[in-house]
Image (spheres, rainbow, N blue to C red):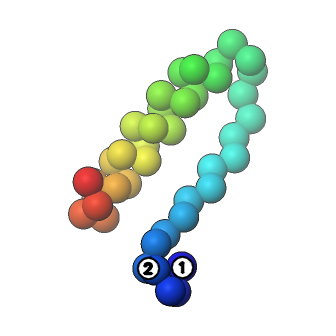
Amino acid sequence: DELTGDIGLLITDWVDADDVENMNLLWESQVNDLRHALGLA
């Protein structure tokens, strides 16, 4: 956002219903790694 300097990330992924929890954990881990790499964590 130009006014606040905030950054948004929208992730869309498709998985089988029985894989949703595992995929959520994977994405949370990947986003945390990204935040750390950007110096935001």
Pick whichever, 1 or 17, lies toward us. Answer: 1
Give the quarter of the figure containing the N terminus. Answer: bottom right
Q: Residue furthest front?
A: 4
Residue at 57 percent of width and 20 percent of height: 21
Q: Amino acid at mark 2?
A: Gly
Instruction: Determine whether, in the image, residue 34 is placed left or right of residue 17.
Output: left
Task: Measure the alpha-carbon separation of dots 1 and 2.
Answer: 5 Å
Q: Residue furthest top?
A: 18
Instruction: Determine whether, in the image, residue 18 is placed left or right of residue 33.
Output: right
Give the quarter of the figure containing the C terminus. Answer: bottom left
Depicted 31 relative to depicted 15: above or below: below
In x, y percent, where is residue 22? 54, 21
In x, y percent, where is residue 28? 45, 38
Depicted 32 relative to depicted 37: above or below: above
The disc label shown at residue 29, or none:
none
Instruction: Determine whether, in the image, residue 17 is placed left or right of residue 35.
Output: right
Kindly state the secondary structure of the residue where label 2 is placed: loop
Kindly state the secondary structure of the residue where label 1 is placed: loop
Q: Identify residue for label 1.
A: 1
The disc label shown at residue 5, or none:
2
In x, y percent, where is residue 10? 62, 55
Q: Amino acid at mark 1?
A: Asp
Q: Quadrant of residue 17?
A: top right
Residue at 43 percent of width and 47 percent of height: 31
